[in-house]
Image (cartoon, helix red, strand yellow):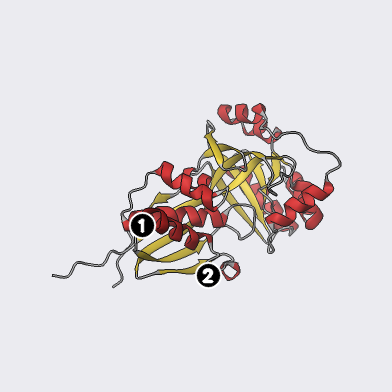
Amino acid sequence: MRTPEHPGVHVRAPGKINLALRVGAREPSGYHPLATVFQAVSLSEDVVARPAEGLSLTVEGRGCDLVPVDGTNLALRAAELLRTVTGTTAGAALQVTKHVPVAGGMAGGSADAAAALLACDQLWGTGLDRRELVELGAELGADVPFALTGLTAVGAGHGDVLTSAMSRGTYHWVLALQDEGLSTPRVFAAFDDLLDDEPPAPEVDEGLLAALLAGDPHELARHLVNDLTDAAVDLMPALDDVLAASARAGALGTVLSGSGPTVAALALDAEHAASVAEVLRRAEVAAEVLVVTAPAPGARVLEPVRAPL
């Protein structure tokens, strides 16, 4: 009797915004020490892993034409790393559906990698626990571990050393997306060029963590900060218009996410977020304006994939 083919594993992993991103001086390695607070949002990536002889990848959704499907893709690299570490010879056909903007500073590629790790682990029965998957994720990139854990966390080191942050309530964010992305290395290079003096060792403002613990969006807005903002604006001057329009729209506060160019505007509640979003759309300062909530869970397995008819 033939055993039915495994229909596949569907995993969803969140994009993120940085509530705070403090950046230190460039190290001899070329990297910068970071102190950041990540918050996972309801805009997420979907990865389905199905049984196959080897490893392959298809991509659909937002910005899919900008995503490589060769060995440089983080999702494929994640699957290959899992095979190498566990010694399995199993394969997988990965299907990525993108919702997070490409090169938007929201770690969409890292979310793909996190989802691929979890999906392939489940598909192949390799039996790694979440801590082991997080350790593997850190080998792929600084944002991958957070896509696995989600919610709200403080990131140290290069952003990959995570500590959970207590956060009460639901936060409402309006995201202003751009047609073009920004290269993270270019933004960090521009940050270095703009420095007059060596920046202090980065650290997270305790006031921001207290605001999260209190569930106070007004207080949180006072502590939103990103040291890469001037560098991103230098490379993409139109971001100044987005920040100004967000203030005119009545946002509680705004912050550039990661290395940009996505700008996140904090609202008081769902009604306020809808109002801010409408003003931003009328201002025509963004290619697309979305409303999301946070914090969102990390990578998780969804309902079983339906078998092909």
Residue at position x 69%, y 33% in the image: 223
Q: Secondary structure at mark 2?
A: loop
In screen coordinates, is 287 left or right of 45?
right
- Residue 294 in percent (x, y) is at 54, 42
User: Please, which residue is most extreme toward the right here?
Assistant: 196
Q: Is residue 128 above or below residue 59?
A: above
**Precedes in sequence: disc 2 or disc 1:** 2
User: Please, which residue is most extreme toward the front here?
Assistant: 28
Q: Can residue 244 be seen? A: no
Q: Which mark is residue 174?
A: none
Q: Which mark is residue 87?
A: 1
Q: How many marks?
A: 2
Residue at position x 35%, y 58% in the image: 9
- Mark 2 or mark 1, whichever is nearer to me: 1
Q: CA distance from mark 2 to mark 1?
A: 22 Å
The kind of residue tagged 2 is: Asp
Neighbourhood count class around disc 2 (C-alpha, 10 Å): few under 14, some 14–19, many 20 upward: few
Q: Nearer the viewer, residue 104 or 143?
A: 143
Q: Nearer the viewer, residue 274 or 36?
A: 36
Residue at position x 75%, y 44% in the image: 247
Q: Secondary structure at mark 1?
A: loop
Q: Quadrant of residue 181?
A: bottom right
Residue at position x 79%, y 57% in the image: 235
In screen coordinates, is 202 left or right of 41?
right
- Residue 61 in percent (x, y) is at 53, 66
Q: Is residue 307 above or below residue 83?
A: below
The kind of residue tagged 1 is: Gly
Q: Can residue 127 be seen? A: yes
Q: Which mark is residue 70?
A: 2
Q: Is residue 179 above or below residue 22?
A: below
User: Please, which residue is most extreme toward the left here?
Assistant: 1
- Residue 135 in percent (x, y) is at 47, 45
